[in-house]
Image: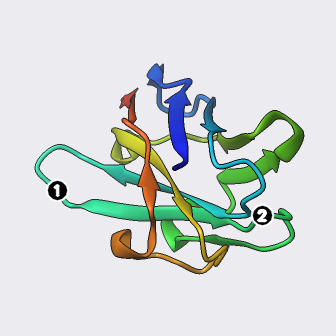
Amino acid sequence: QVHLVESGGGLVQAGDSLRLSCVASGRTGSTYAIGWFRQAPGKKRDFVVAINWSGGSTYYTESVRGRFTISRDNAKNTVYLQMSSLKPEDTAVYYCAADLHNNPFSIREWEYDYWGQGTQVTVSS
């Protein structure tokens, strides 16, 4: 069992930056990729970015490439999502998820084994 807790969401203006954190606990000794997904009101949950255990491989969806940066500190069991140049269309609940197959190219929800509860990001225009 991997327990994930997201934090760092909030209300910001367009063009601002925000850093989300995803802290993992449980199942020590396992290696896993972490993915971030987001779900806007009335829409399905979409893949944003993922990173493998070592941090050496990442994969971004096109709409955030160049604006978002994912990183991880395994000593702190934490994955970060640095979001810059935020746009109103980035408004969503952001979820982190763990893939025990450690595949940074997992973009589908069913490829992930554990999920956090989500953190709200709202970008005003």
| Circle nearer the viewer, 2 or 1 | 2
Point 45% across, 54% down: residue? 114
User: Which residue corresponds to mark 2?
Assistant: 53
Point 52% across, 32% down: residue? 5
- Up-down relation of residue 54 to residue 19 (above or below): below
Q: Residues within 10 Å of mark 2 (few under 14, many from 20)?
A: many
Q: Does dot 1 land on a helix, a strand or a loop?
A: loop
- Up-down relation of residue 38 to residue 75 (above or below): below
Point 71% across, 53% down: residue? 70
Q: CA distance from mark 2 to mark 1?
A: 29 Å
Task: Report the colour scheme.
Answer: rainbow
- Up-down relation of residue 99 to residue 116 (above or below): below
Task: Indicate which disc residue 125 carries.
Answer: none
Q: As shown in the figure, which amino acid type bears the numbered disc 2? A: Trp
Indicate the position of residue 17 as horizontal and vertical percent values: 63, 31
Q: Does dot 2 land on a helix, a strand or a loop?
A: loop
Res 56 quadrant in image:
bottom right
Indicate the position of residue 18 as horizontal and vertical percent values: 61, 29
Point 11% across, 49% down: residue? 42
Q: As shown in the figure, which amino acid type bears the numbered disc 1? A: Lys
Does residue 65 appear in the picture of this structure? no
Is tag 2's residue or tag 1's residue first in the polypeptide sequence? 1
Task: Indicate which disc residue 43 carries.
Answer: 1
112 relative position to 84: left or right: left
Indicate the position of residue 122 as horizontal and vertical percent values: 37, 28
Indicate the position of residue 34 as horizontal and vertical percent values: 61, 58
Along the viewing direction, whichever of 23 and 37 lies nearer the viewer: 23
- Up-down relation of residue 106 to residue 79 (above or below): below
Q: Residues within 10 Å of mark 1 (few under 14, many from 20)?
A: few
Res 125 quadrant in image:
top left
Along the viewing direction, whichever of 67 and 115 lies nearer the viewer: 115
7 relative position to 90: left or right: right
